[in-house]
């Protein structure tokens, strides 16, 4: 595809397609992290008209992964390979937006806490599945449009812009839900969801533009592709998706290692973000607004370094070593968050910088490795399977994090209890990072034993 674009003098087309793809993901990241910087409000449900406590908030955040874990991602990933990104992606971009609308309705409904939480949980389940399949469609599209060059850079750039959605949520949400001594109304609590839904609606419009662009380009290239396919019927047959291919992916050692690294590393980042405010506020004696800025250093750092590291992976290779380095940086960050001096915000900023570097290094090498370990005909399915393993871990670790913190603070809202809960949950993240380093090392060993895969080779030399 990339060579066809260049041969037709349309080198700008992949970048135009990428510009359309990043906006739905920006909106998805914003909506998913809209409460992360202000999660401390759930530590005192008597101050919320919504009435949710920390355990209910943790349960709500786990909803993102529920449908993904219980078969949704696997089935929909196969649909992506059978129906293509335009049809499948359109369905799930729409589902993501509809799920977000249901969450907003639940937040503003005025229903009793348990009922509003279950309604929001339902919306978050559909939002989560839609978001994950939309993200799979985006990665599948980037692999198609940038095949043969700049894939890691393009994936890193998409990831950086998407994470700006997280950064925006960290900064904007405390402005929308301002700290006060009184009760937070339903309208105040729902403000971040209103902004997130507007972003997702804009993303729907740009996704429609991408669909038109992708369809038009495929139509122009159809004769070239058809003539090449006629030269080899066996090659055409080999490119067709088969259900039996799924078993081949699941039994692949490299797939298993990559998936384990993904779930361990991302759980140490994403589950942390969900409770970032509840960890940083008591640990470093700062306000929710300051915690939002502190956490935003994480995605802001990836805006520069994710595409930069992707470009370096394309040019110099050594991707598996970058995964090890990123996991080590994440471990150092969580050790600082757990054991850094109490009440000294500077240590929190240092930890966020280290976590930001790690959050850029690992994905910059991890996601471009997926197309190297499986045939292209099962690429959508493989991305979905990796996301499935990731979401299984995220669902469990988000719930576990909420339970760990709630065990300390339920019935005891004192500063000492909140600090103890923050340290306890940070120890969980430390363990995850240690396990991620071990898996990254095993994946590097596998790369050394299988140089033909080109996992550590520069782009175009694998």
Image (cartoon, rainbow, N blue to C red):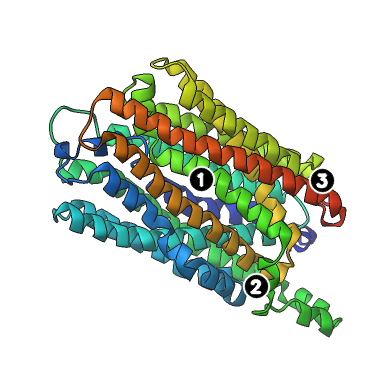
Q: Is mark 1 on a helix, strand or loop?
A: helix
Whether residue 149 appears in this view of the structure is yes
For the residue pair 94 and 351, the one nearer the viewer reads as: 351
Image-based side of 439 in relation to 445, left or right: left
Q: What element carries label 2?
A: helix
Answer above or below: position of 280 versus 6: above
Q: Which of marks 2 and 1 is nearer the N terminus?
A: 2
Q: Mark 2 points at which residue?
A: 246
Q: How far, Cα to Cα, is label 1 from label 3?
A: 28 Å
Q: Where is residue 27 in the image (x, y as percent from the top left)?
A: 43, 50
Q: Quadrant of residue 83?
A: bottom right
Q: Which of marks 1 and 3 is nearer the N terminus?
A: 1
Q: Where is residue 9 in the image (x, y as percent from the top left)?
A: 76, 57
Q: How far, Cα to Cα, is label 3 from label 2?
A: 28 Å
Q: How far, Cα to Cα, is label 2 from label 1?
A: 25 Å
Comparing marks 3 and 2, which lies closer to the viewer? 2
Q: Mark 3 points at which residue?
A: 458
Whether residue 34 appears in this view of the structure is no
Q: Mark 1 points at which residue?
A: 267
Q: Which of marks 3 and 2 is nearer the N terminus?
A: 2
Answer above or below: position of 234 versus 154: below
Q: Where is residue 332 in the image (x, y as percent from the top left)?
A: 58, 27
Few, some or many C-alpha atoms within 10 Å of disc 1 (few <14, some 14-19, many ≥20)? many
Q: In which quarter of the image is residue 10?
A: bottom right
Q: Which residue is drawn at 58% across and 32% down?
A: 331
For the residue pair 334 and 175, the one nearer the viewer reads as: 334
- The answer to whether the residue labelled 3 contacts the one labelled 2, judged by CB atoms less than 8 Å apart, is no
């Amino acid at each position: 595809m990339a060579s066809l674009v260049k041969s037709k003098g349309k080198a700008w087309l992949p970048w135009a397609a990428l510009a359309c793809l990043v906006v739905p993901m920006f909106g998805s990241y914003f909506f998913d992290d809209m409460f992360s910087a202000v999660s401390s409000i759930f530590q005192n449900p008597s101050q919320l008209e919504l009435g949710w406590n920390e355990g209910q908030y943790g349960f709500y955040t786990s909803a993102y992964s529920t449908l993904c874990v219980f078969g949704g991602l696997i089935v929909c990933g196969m649909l992506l390979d059978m129906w293509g990104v335009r049809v499948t992606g359109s369905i799930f971009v729409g589902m993501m937006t509809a799920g977000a609308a249901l969450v907003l309705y639940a937040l503003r409904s005025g229903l009793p806490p348990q009922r509003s939480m279950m309604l929001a949980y339902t919306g978050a389940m559909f939002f989560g599945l839609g978001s994950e399949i939309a993200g799979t469609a985006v990665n599948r599209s980037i692999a198609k449009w940038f095949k043969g060059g700049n894939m890691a850079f393009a994936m890193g750039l998409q990831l950086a812009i998407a994470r700006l959605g997280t950064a925006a949520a960290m900064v904007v949400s405390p402005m929308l839900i301002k700290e006060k001594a009184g009760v937070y109304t339903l309208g105040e609590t729902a403000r971040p969801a209103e902004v997130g839904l507007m972003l997702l609606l804009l993303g729907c419009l740009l996704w429609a533009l991408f669909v038109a662009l992708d369809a038009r380009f495929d139509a122009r290239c159809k004769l070239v592709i058809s003539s090449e396919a006629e030269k080899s019927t066996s090659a055409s047959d080999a490119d067709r998706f088969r259900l039996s291919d799924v078993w081949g992916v699941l039994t692949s050692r490299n797939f298993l290692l990559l998936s384990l690294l993904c779930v361990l590393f991302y759980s140490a980042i994403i589950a942390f973000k969900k409770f970032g405010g509840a960890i940083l506020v008591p640990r470093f004696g700062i306000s929710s607004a300051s915690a939002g800025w502190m956490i935003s250093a994480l995605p802001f750092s990836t805006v520069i370094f994710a595409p930069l590291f992707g470009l370096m992976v394309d040019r110099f290779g050594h991707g598996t070593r970058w995964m090890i380095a990123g996991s080590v940086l994440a471990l150092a960050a969580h050790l600082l968050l757990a054991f850094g001096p109490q009440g000294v915000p500077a240590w929190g900023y240092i930890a966020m910088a280290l976590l930001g570097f790690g959050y850029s290094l690992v994905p910059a090498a991890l996601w471009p490795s997926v197309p190297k370990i499986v045939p292209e005909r099962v690429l959508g399915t493989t991305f979905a399977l990796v996301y499935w393993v990731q979401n299984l871990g995220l669902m469990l670790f988000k719930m576990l994090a909420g339970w760990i913190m709630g065990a300390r603070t339920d019935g005891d809202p004192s500063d000492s209890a909140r600090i103890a809960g923050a340290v306890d949950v940070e120890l969980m993240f430390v363990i995850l990072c240690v396990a991620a380093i071990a898996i990254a090392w095993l994946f590097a060993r596998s790369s050394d034993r299988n140089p033909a895969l080109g996992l550590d080779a520069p782009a175009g030399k694998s």
